[in-house]
Amino acid sequence: MTEARTPIDLLQIGDVADRTGLSLRTIRHYEEVGLLPEPQRSSGGFRLYTQEAIERLLLIKRMKPLDFTLDEMRDLIDVRDQLASPRLSRAARADLTQRLRTYHALVEHSLAGLRERAASAEAFARQLGDEID
Amino acid sequence: MTEARTPIDLLQIGDVADRTGLSLRTIRHYEEVGLLPEPQRSSGGFRLYTQEAIERLLLIKRMKPLDFTLDEMRDLIDVRDQLASPRLSRAARADLTQRLRTYHALVEHSLAGLRERAASAEAFARQLGDEID
DNA sequence: ATTGGACCCTACCCTTACGTGAGGGTAGAG
DNA sequence: CTCTACCCTCACGTAAGGGTAGGGTCCAAT
């Protein structure tokens, strides 16, 4: 009987910011550049987000330390999303998997860079510590 | 007798770039913002760098992974340079050392952040690897 | 019905650390 | 001289947001 629960599950941008730890500006920016799909709007124009959007933002947040550009993230997420669809020709699936593999290599590369940076930073920290003596 | 070896030891910006791995633009930019002192010029206007400048650039390069702003680096280097001078009142020395200590804490903090980023990146890399299965 | 406070909207300029030309001069070997 | 490799100064462009202005929306309490 109660089938119309319309605005339930929908969050305003401020709530989304709280739940993801991202700023309002950042969330809007992700939308501007197409990294986050445009959400519904209230009659007055407020953005209304689904749980799905939050998960997408959390995924993006996990990718951030890799220093990917927003474009790369968008593309990577797209590939991943397409792969999740069951209706795909074998060729398409192979193609997408290949792209994912490329990204995986990029991730590993970026990770190696991060580790190098950490090592370099550590050396500098020690040097600075010594200079204080 | 041979006492005038003027332009020896002086390098043009391209050589400096090669020896430091920084771009010409980057080196000029560091000068623009006061991170690198203005070098001598040839009669025609070419920048001529001393070995000291190269060492400063290499120091800056070692700091870069810490994500300090150029302003912070300039300040940190200044503090370090001043501390190297032997003519300092006890008070001034104490003050500078304190500032250096603050920077050291900042460095440690930044380092911790880098490690966290690496861990997060690693997790993402594994997740992506699994998704390829 | 109105009001008030919390929240949201767009538009636009600001920032950092350079990249990328355009247009033109310099160093020095041949 | 001339050639080639370098170098110079503008000066605008970029990524990923930060910050502010000026103004509308939501909704609970009056």
Image (cartoon, coloured by chain):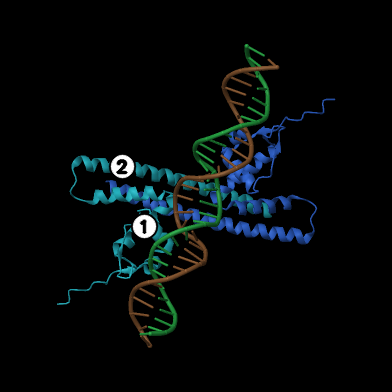
Chain colours: A blue, B cyan, C brown, D green
Q: Quadrant of the N terminus of chain A?
A: top right
Residue that mark 2 sits on: B99
Q: Mark 1 points at which residue?
A: B31
The disc labelled 2 sits on which kind of residue?
A: Arg
Tell me which residue sits at (42%, 43%) in the image.
B109
Instruction: Give the spatial CA distance, label 1 vs label 2.
Output: 24 Å
On what subunit does the disc labeled 2 rest?
B
Percent coordinates x, y for residue A53 in the rendering:
67, 40
Q: In this view, does D19 lie to the left or right of B49?
A: right
Residue A46 in the image, given as x and y percentages of width and height? 67, 34
Q: Is residue B97 left or right of residue A78?
A: left
On screen, residue A4 versus residue D25, left or right, reads right
Q: Nearer the viewer, mark 1 or mark 2?
A: 1
Which one is earlier in the sequence, the residue at label 1 or at label 2? 1
Q: Where is residue A127 in the image (x, y as percent from the top left)?
A: 33, 51
Three-letter code for the amino acid on which mark 1 is drawn: Glu
**In this picture, is A5 found above or below B94?**
above
Chain letter of the residue beneath label 1 in the structure image:
B
Crowdedness near tag 1: few (<14), some (14–19) or many (≥20) residues, C-alpha within 10 Å: some
The spot of residue C6 in percent (x, y) is: 58, 25
Above or below D25: residue C24: below
- Which residue reaches farthest left? B1
Q: Quadrant of residue C24?
A: bottom left
The answer to whether residue D21 is above or below residue A80 is: above
Residue A29 image-quadrant placement: top right
What element does badge 1 sit on?
Answer: helix
* Residue drawn at x 40%, y 57% as measured from the top left: B29
Element carrying mark 2: helix
Mark 2 Cα shell of 10 Å, populated few (<14), some (14-19), many (≥20): some
